[in-house]
Amino acid sequence: MNLNYRGLALCFALVACSMAIGAQPNVTPEQLQQLLKRYPDADTNHDGTLSPDEVRAYRQKLAGSRKGKARGDKASLPPATRADVSYGPHERDVLDLWIAPSGKPTPLVVFIHGGGFVSGNKSQARPEAIRRCLDAGVSFMSINYRFLSQAPVQDILRDAARAIQFVRANAAEYNLDPRRIAAYGGSAGAGTSLWLGVHDDLADPKSADPVLRQSSRIVAAGCISGQATYDLVEWQEVIGKFKPEWYSDPEEDLKFYHFKSRDDFATPAGRKVLDDCSMLRLITPGDAPVFMTCSLLDTEPENRNHLLHHPRHMQAVKERYDKAGVEVHIVSTAGKAQEKSAGNQDLLGFLLERLGAGKPNR
């Protein structure tokens, strides 16, 4: 697609500037819709609306593309040590791995991309995050996973768990310390990271698959505008209610779990699925410390995107974490455009610290 970078950058700059000055963008819904029609890629979660986060992210993406071309694409991802490694049976079960040079096994940070479980790619990992980890002597991994058109959310979450188990099974080959693995991501990647941090260990010592014999646990999780639970019924009480016009499909909730009918929500098997997908109900003492950040306003949800990424998600997690006595940090950057990157930077620093980056292996 041929983009008018100058015109689009100016338009997005005006939007970003207004967001930095006030709590809400000083642009009309009609202007945002015009941007959406012309540049649909900006709607990263495919909810049919543009949020302040998406405006900033797309503007930064375009700015990065222009700078990258001017610098000979120095901003692009550094070449992976191992690329498109298959960690499972599905074609999307692949990972990229950047191995930090070291004479000792290295810790590992795992990036899980967002996209509402319907889109996204492991290439969404930020080059600066990869370089920061490698400079700290920490290896970095970015994974793909199946989408909802291919598997229900409860199985997609296990794709991420299998990726963790896979690198543990191959830790010696990749020079990794299997005891020091952390995960983070944005939106769906954030919720998945939280799920990994609170879910009981999925290791099955009796499995015929050597990968599944490994632990799925992580030592820390980082969440950028993520969700507190993937039990959508629980959202009604904890986060807020979906308005009918916010659904992309009348059967969206059924398709999330691949349920055949609404009766499935009340069956023992259905309840088991919902329990397995509720990070809030899975939280117990001894779970992984978590760092959460969100840049949306703590007001009544105004649209689908606001509900999906509302700060109430991280507030609900903090309440449960506090009750369980587990370390949790939340950072709200709403209305503070200049502080958003600082909050996310702190998130990565949090993970590196919990991994003992720079400290000798014990």
Image (spheres, grey):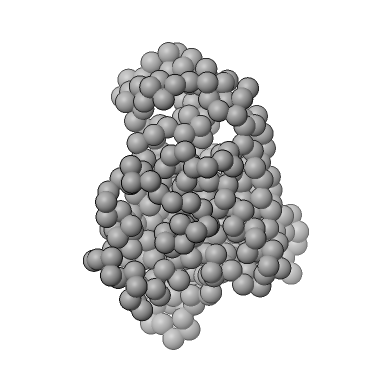
Q: Is residue 144 above or below residue 332?
A: below
How many numbered tags mark residues here?
A: 0
Residue situated in front as seen by the camera: 157 or 328: 328
Quadrant containing the N terminus in the rendered view: top left
Q: Residue at the bottom extreme? A: 206
Q: Is 234 left or right of 253, judged from the image as shown? A: right
Instruction: Say if residue 79 shows up in the picture.
Output: no
Residue at point 57% right, 50% down?
312
Residue at point 34% right, 73% down?
266
Q: Is residue 193 above or below residue 134?
A: below
Q: Is residue 93 above or below residue 9?
A: below
Task: Where is residue 14? Give x, y as percent.
Answer: 52, 17
Instruction: Say if residue 328 shows up in the picture.
Output: yes
Residue situated in front as seen by the camera: 184 or 270: 270
Task: Where is residue 289? Give x, y as percent.
Answer: 66, 61
Residue 105 quadrant: bottom right
Residue 268 quadrant: bottom left
Task: Where is residue 358? Give x, y as percent.
Answer: 74, 54
Q: Is residue 134 above or below residue 194?
A: above
Residue at point 48% right, 20% down?
27
Q: Is 282 left or right of 325, judged from the image as shown? A: left
Residue at point 69% right, 48% down?
349
